[in-house]
Image (cartoon, grey):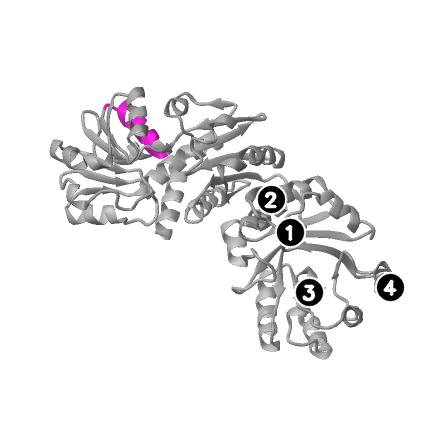
Amino acid sequence: MLCIPIIGPTLAKIESQVAQGCCRGDLLELRIDLFDDIDLKALKRLREAIAVPVIITLRKVDQGGRYRGSEEMRLRDIEQLADLLPEYLDLEYDVPPAFIDQIRREFPSIQLILSYHNFSLMPDDLEGVLHRMQRVARAIYKIACMAQSTNDALRMLLFVKEHPSVFGMAMGEVGQVSRILGPIVGNPWGFATVNEEGSAPGQLSYEDLSQIYTVRRLNQKSAIYGLIGGSVALSLSDRTHNAVMRELEVNAVYVKMALRASELEEFFFLAKKIGFQGLSVTMPLKEAILPFLDEIEESAAEIGAVNTLVFREDKLIGYNTDGKGALDAIEERFLVAGKRVMVLGAGGAAKAIIYEAIKRGAYVTVLNRNLKRAEELAQKWPLKAATLESIAEEFQRGYDVLINATPDALPIDPCWIDPKSLVMESKTQPKMTSLLNHAEQLGCDLVFGYEMFVNQAVRQFELWFPGIGPSKVRKILLCEALKRL
């Protein structure tokens, strides 16, 4: 279920938000501490017009609220608000037990939510937090803490999964994964905004939760997939991969998670406990994850980089679909056997492309800022290694294909782009990088990053869902990717 926070602050905005919320949400939270004033008559009229269940919250300042009066005044106002007979009343975990008992005696139909908020960090001892809250029995225990990392968000998800009485979420941008995966671990509902501002950091919009992640169809049997890497914000994969799952009616969801190499050990421990089934891997983790894998597919081991993970029978298995994805896109124009291919860069994606190009019979030259890294590849495979400064010499020698596998939009001077060559960009966004713009002006044939992205993603789906129709997957991925570029 999705709960829409009503934050006002004016009566006109409250009424507008309620109208939108009733059309979208399964219940509404009236955050009365965020309203300009507490007008009980107006609130009564509003409450009578709301057809969905209601949570009433009058949050104090040290728990993230903006109530401006004393604590004595706040408790008195809460008692008056309870006269509106909401389905739920949200109270802080440290409200006096005597007050809670009084509310229960006077308003037995109201279900109590007992809340703990920490806007600074995710406590190490969530068990201790819950123990302090459980001094009040027969309540929904809501714990919301600020995530400093993806692992913080996963710790909260695992805590909820292991404690069915807890409704928990991680706040902040890196905590958003907990808001998406909440239904899978047992959270009774999630919060979704109907305007740009939410009632807590990291809340996602109703449109994103319902349309991209389709959280209403998620349940405790839904499979979890995702993307891990250092820079995941610009990736299209949450939209493309969830579109495939939605249209092919796969009970699964795909989320993006920013992660550092130093966090991998804890991440994989948590991911296995929570029940992840597969992952995409992007920069800079394609090589860093290798020590954590139980098995590595032969070609991925030869490449020394992994972009796809499968969780199978408590084992973590690594694959690489990047190289095949890139070369498939190029070979839609012509075969590379016997052609001269120049690759800029020597990172994880570059290695996969180089490996596959050599396997298909190309003559490969690798240019990299760090010559040592390129020379290490030359010791493994039959290729020429040089620095990016050698581009003039290579231009004179000639090449058929130029592939940019560096993070730079224009890693070489445009004067060294051969007008007779095919030029490929490995990055998905933007569609037209500076390199491709210059190449187009010279009349070069172009291969866009999204083409490689779609090809490698089709192969990922085949690994995650054996037997799935690749042509259907490709059509959905391509359509969705082009919408976003």
Residue 465 appearing in the image: no
Which x, y percent locates residue 2?
A: 61, 56
Q: Which residue bears the numbered disc 4?
A: 102
Q: Residue at 28% of width from left, 48% of height from top? A: 433
Q: Which mark is residue 61?
A: 3
153 to 71, vertically: above or below: above
Residue in the picture at 22% in, 31% down: 341
Give the extent of the magenta segment.
349-361
Q: Which is in the foreground here, disc 4 or disc 3?
A: 3
N-terminal of the pair, mark 4 or mark 3, is 3
Marks 4, 2: nearer the viewer: 2
Badge 2 marks a residue whose secondary structure is helix
Is 295 left, or right, of 125 in this rendering?
Answer: left
Q: List the residue tagged with mark 2.
A: 152
Q: Main secondary structure of the magenta part?
A: helix
Q: Earlier in the sequence, mark 4 or mark 2?
A: 4
Q: Gap in Å between the C-alphas at discs 3 and 2?
A: 24 Å
Q: N-terminal of the two: label 2 or label 1? A: 1
Q: Total label count? A: 4
User: In this rendering, which labeled residue sits more in front, label 1 or label 4?
Assistant: 1
Give me the C-alpha separation between circle 2 and circle 1.
9 Å
Could you tell me how far apart the alpha carbons at marks 1 and 4 are, in whole angstroms? 28 Å
Pointer 1: what residue?
145
**Which residue is located at x 34 percent, y 45 percent?**
428
**Could you tell me the amino acid type at mark 1?**
Cys
Q: Are marks 2 and 1 in contact (CB under 8 Å)?
A: yes
Q: Residues within 10 Å of mark 1 (few under 14, many from 20)?
A: many
Q: Are marks 4 and 3 in contact (CB under 8 Å)?
A: no
Indicate yes or no whether the magenta region holds residue 415: no
